[in-house]
Image (cartoon, grey):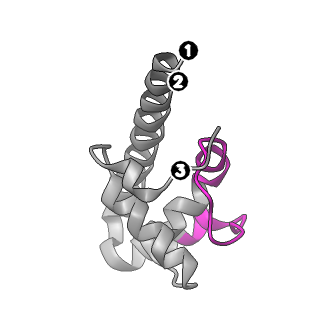
Amino acid sequence: MPLIQTNDFDGLPGADAIRAGLEDLAVGRESVESLLIQIGAPRLSWLGIVLPAKPELDADRRLYRLLAAQHGNAAHSQFNSLIRQLVSFERALEGRQGRVAAQHE
């Protein structure tokens, strides 16, 4: 996979959150978005996104704790919603890359 730039995210679901997470991760800021990037790191890297920092192994637990502090009992639904958003972004980017690759064959 070729390396891609964040402007390649235009029109993809969750693109703003992914951009924000990459920016936060680059400056070492722990945020909902940066933790989401860390959770999705294996697939995002496979898709050609350069991660600005090595992901932490417990990002999922840290994200849940952060959501619990912000949303209380709604943390579980918030967590699931964010994971769905991440997966939707990954699938859309993979689909876009597949269409671009097919056009160049």
Q: Residue at x 48, y 78 (%)?
A: 24
Where is the C terminus found, in terms of image quarters?
top right
Q: Are marks 1 and 3 in contact (CB under 8 Å)?
A: no
Q: Which residue is disc 1 drawn over?
A: 105
Residue 101: mark:
2
Check disc 2 and report its element: helix, strand or loop: helix
- Relative depth, front residue between 98 and 15: 98
Magenta stretch holds residue 60: yes
Q: Nearer the viewer, mark 2 or mark 1?
A: 1
26 left or right, relative to 18:
right
Magenta stretch holds residue 54: yes
Residue 4: mark:
3
Check disc 3 and report its element: helix, strand or loop: loop
Does 47 sit above or below residue 41?
A: above
Which region shows up in magenta? 40-62
- Relative depth, front residue between 69 and 37: 37
Camera sees residue 77: no
Q: Report the Cα–Cα distance between label 1 and label 3.
A: 19 Å
> Label 2 crowding class (10 Å Cα cut-off): few <14, some 14-19, many 20+?
few
Q: Quadrant of residue 43?
A: top right
Q: Nearer the viewer, mark 1 or mark 3?
A: 1
Q: Position of residue 14 (x, y in %)?
A: 33, 51
Q: Position of residue 94 (x, y in %)?
A: 50, 32
Upstream in sequence: badge 2 or badge 3: 3
**What amino acid type is highlighted by mark number 1?**
Glu
- How many numbered badges does the structure rendering display? 3
Does 38 sit above or below residue 24?
A: above
**What amino acid type is highlighted by mark number 2?**
Ala
> Label 1 crowding class (10 Å Cα cut-off): few <14, some 14-19, many 20+?
few
Does 65 sit above or below residue 48?
A: below
